[in-house]
Amino acid sequence: MHGALAIPNDVCSLLADVDIFISQTLKGENLSKKAKEKREVLLKKMKDVKARYPQEFQDKELEDEEQSEVSLPPDSLSIASDRYDKEDEAPSDGHQFPLIAAQDLQFVLKAGYLEKRRKDHSFLGFEWQKRWCAISKTVFYYYGSDKDKQQKGEFTLEGYTIRMNNSLRKDAKKDCCFEISAPDKRIYQFTAATPQEAEEWVQQVKFVIQDSESNTIPEEQEEDYDDVCHVSSESIDDSIYEEVKDNKNTDYANFYQGLWDCTGDVPDELTFKRGDVIYILSKEYNRFGWWVGEMKGTIGLVPKAYIMEMYDI
């Protein structure tokens, strides 16, 4: 219609942002069947509006293309959506950990994709988000994907408890849900792909929590020494220095210690406890997550995720 009024710039800009949110932001989300149908209807309506007012939206798209390199986040979401995401996933206790890429995490005990529930999910029913999650030592990290250069959020597991919770959802995945909670702290709720996988996450988190609670090192009592008044006149046996002389060329880089208790499932796997000293003989099975180590004269396979370097060289 030639006599139709032009769309005001602010309304046009708002519609363009809504279009990005519907077409891109919601594209990879786990929406209900009804929400997906509604999304398709809105996409068709947006397409009709663009066809009716081609000039207004063409100008807007050209502006967006010129600004995309500096204004849009890496995943092409709108700035408003990205800010909303960061605010939702900020640690509730304000305790920030250093930014780290997903592939640079050390001592990963378990990792994989889960669906994480938003803290505030009232906006357009946008409730569950796919997140790549990982437990590194005692910290639970979550990322947009396993290729992300920095985490979207994290929290230390100390002080938390974990349990299965089938009341979080009413769909087919209700038996795949679990939640991690602590007094006066944010509750984190997740959904795994299967009930078995959810149970595996629960057991692993319980293991980390129990281990962190038992990791109390008793203080050693200081002994009183009187090294002034009592000097022995006996000659010193030089043999006490032999051990130091023999170990001058010790390969300290290959000395590790147990980070967690580990019980071997088969005879060729070493059984050790937290703090046990293990000398690594070979890393030829590194790509499988195993090394060959020696402890107290026994040689066997060692899961590398359960040990840590003994010396900082």
Image: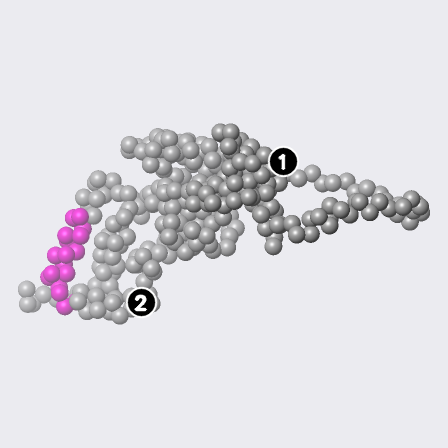
Residue, far left: 1
Give me the residue at 73% from left, 48% from top: 244
How many residues crowd mark 2 within 10 Å: few (<14), some (14–19), many (20+)? Answer: few
Query: Please, is residue 172 above or below residue 67 in the view?
Result: above
* Residue 211 within the segment the image draws in magenta: no
Pointer 2 residue: 69
Give me the residue at 43% from left, 54% from top: 101
Q: Which residues are magenta?
A: 40-56
Measure the C-alpha gap from mark 1 to mark 2: 59 Å
* Residue 53 within the segment the image draws in magenta: yes
Query: Please, is residue 14 above or below residue 129 in the view?
Result: below
Pointer 1 residue: 296
Q: Is residue 184 visible?
A: no
Q: Nearer the viewer, residue 161 or 203?
A: 203
Q: Quadrant of the C terminus?
A: bottom right
User: Residue 102 at what x, y percent from top left?
Assistant: 42, 51
- What secondary structure is found at the residue carrying circle 2? helix
Give me the residue at 65% from left, 49% from top: 250
- Picture quadrant where residue 198 is located: top left
User: Residue 145 at what x, y percent from top left?
Assistant: 36, 50
User: Residue 299 at what x, y percent from top left?
Assistant: 56, 36
Query: Please, is residue 161 above or below residue 97 in the view?
Result: above
Q: Amino acid at mark 1?
A: Lys
Q: Nearer the viewer, residue 186 or 202?
A: 202
- Residue contact at pointers 1 and 2, CB within 8 angstroms: no
Q: Is residue 197 visible?
A: yes
Left or right of 194: which side holds 183? right
